[in-house]
Amino acid sequence: MAKVILEPIGGSIEQTLDLEDFRKNAEQMEVLEREFQALRDEVRRGWGQKYVERVHAKDKLTVWERVDRLKDPGSQVFPIGTFVNHGRMFGEGKGARTSPGAGVLTAFVKIHARYTIVIANDNTVASGSWWPQTPEKIIRAQEIALRLRIPVIYLVDCSGLFLPEQSNTFPGKTGAGKIFKMNSLLSDQQVPQIAGVFGDCIAGGGYMPIISDIVYMTDQAYMVIAGAALVKGGKSQNITSLTIGGSDIHVHLSSCADYRVHDDEALLQKIKDEVARLPSSAVQYYYYGAQPAPPRFPPRELTGLFPIDYRLGYDMRQVIARLVDNSLFWELSSRKGEEMIVGVGRVGGLYAGFIANNVNLIDHPTRKGHKRPGGILYKEGIAKISAFSRACNDDGLPIIWLQDISGFDIGLEAEKQGLLGYGSSLIYTNSTNTTPMVTVLLRKASGAGYYAMAGMPYDPVLQLSTPITRLAVMEGRTLAIGAFNTKLDDNFNIVAADQKEYERIKAGMQAVEDRITRDMYPINSAKQRDTDEIVFMHELRGYLRAIVEMSYQSTGYRRVKNPRIWSMHDINVLSDI
């Protein structure tokens, strides 16, 4: 009988790293965390206290107050898309405005021991209007729910499109209309959708809850195709939005809503009651006799494990040891493709496959006594992770990709070995996998290596970045060398006729390097949705535990094999021959 034998991985900080280096790493990381936490807080405040008071004056709760009342006591909310639109200004002059978080909160929220995805308009930002990228952010949350078959909760308080920016929100393939298609696809796949309408619900905001299975409205909520101002202008009728689309109309006459409640508090309780009626989570079933357990080594230590300087290495196995339960791991094919680490561990009591870059120097497979850099995809490593990725997909294990990659090997030997073909096999595998994949960009995410290791274009169910992620085709220095190649010798030294030309070329190269380095700032990828969320190193286990649990929460929509019949047992046997 095949058994999964998880063995201890990692060691204490004292065994792993010079304590002074650990302290310096931690201090540098904590500086970045404080910077990013301040930006998170800025998004959470919306348009500020004045607008919070306006909401409260209407006897309504703010978006975060609603979410805090929805979640299970003591549970953590996991936001995604926090920095969408960060730093963008809309309009000109004194009328220019920001849209913190694109005016909508999307997050994983546990209700009655089941994870849900909550999509909630921020009613402190232009009365919950949709801005450029608001539809895309909502659609991304709906896609995750569809992939994992977990309930969607809509907390609707939306005055429709922010009209001055309508050309950037309304017409495109991922414009506002795609939200309603996703509503339909979720309904078609029997993914529960529960909507609460709390206030303004105009045009697209009115359509969003309608396809939900159950729709609640408060006494002061209304849903209308066009608000009273447009009706007055178009039909010369002196009416209010509440009289044409309030709960009196939609609960008792049109049947566009199901139930009427008095206020926000009552509606939130009704949503919780509805979630409680859903089938229970399958997570306990898939523990296979185990129970969740923390790692032996605290996840908080991840803050000091990573050198900020991307040119310095670290031990990826120590990272895994601070992510998996009891710091126990089953590593496969450890003697082949040493630049890659593959194996299985439990996260929150549930099995997950791990594929990670080994960024340290590794033994050269054919030149005895020689080393070659890790963090690069060579033939053996590509073949190893391709086979392991296919095995995880076949066995139904969610895959966690831990990226710190510089790219593929290059040069004559790489081409002779057919790296293009091996890379194509890996890309095909990840493109056709149906098991949930989570991609974590720990530090470097460069070139085609980022693609091959299930980067965002390959549809991971979630992609996370960190404060030190560098997502780009290549580093700034390398790109500067390429851009000024005709001005350099074979050793990349500047070739110039005189000192003046030398200084000009040097300054040009430095300007290119500085611009590319600025472009790699993680906020830049987050604000344009090239990554789902920026998380701190010590928060990684929490996010991974949540997404792994969501992968097992629902049954009947994907293959999940019991561990005795995993195909990776065969890989393990063959790798020992």
Image (cartoon, rainbow, N blue to C red):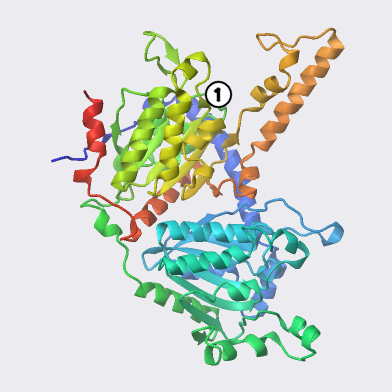
Q: Residue at x 50, y 68 (%)?
A: 184
Q: Residue at x 72, y 69 (%)?
A: 50
Q: Is residue 147 left or right of residue 501?
A: left
Where is residue 82? Give x, y as percent: 59, 54
Query: Disc 1 marks which amino acid?
Result: Arg
Q: Quadrant of residue 346?
A: top left
User: What is the tally of numbered marks visible in this picture?
Assistant: 1
Is the residue 349 above or below the residue 370 in the image?
below
Where is residue 523? Give x, y as percent: 63, 44
* SS state under label 1: loop
Q: Residue at x 41, y 57 (%)?
A: 148
Q: Quadrant of the C terminus?
A: top left
Rate crowding at label 1 as few (under 14), some (14 to 19) or many (20 or more) other CA atoms within 10 Å: few
Asked if residue 352 shows in the view, the reply is no
Asked if residue 101 shows in the view, the reply is yes
Q: Quadrant of the N terminus?
A: top left
Where is residue 71? Give x, y as percent: 45, 66
Q: Quadrant of residue 137?
A: bottom right
Is the residue 260 above or below the residue 473 in the image?
below
**For mark 1, what is the residue?**
311
Viewer-nearest residue: 32 or 138? 138
Q: Residue at x 41, y 23 (%)?
A: 379
Is the residue 460 above or below the residue 273 in the image?
above
Where is residue 228? Give x, y as percent: 73, 84
Q: Is residue 207 left or right of residue 233?
A: left
User: Which residue extends farthest left?
Assistant: 1
Viewer-nearest residue: 314 or 184? 184
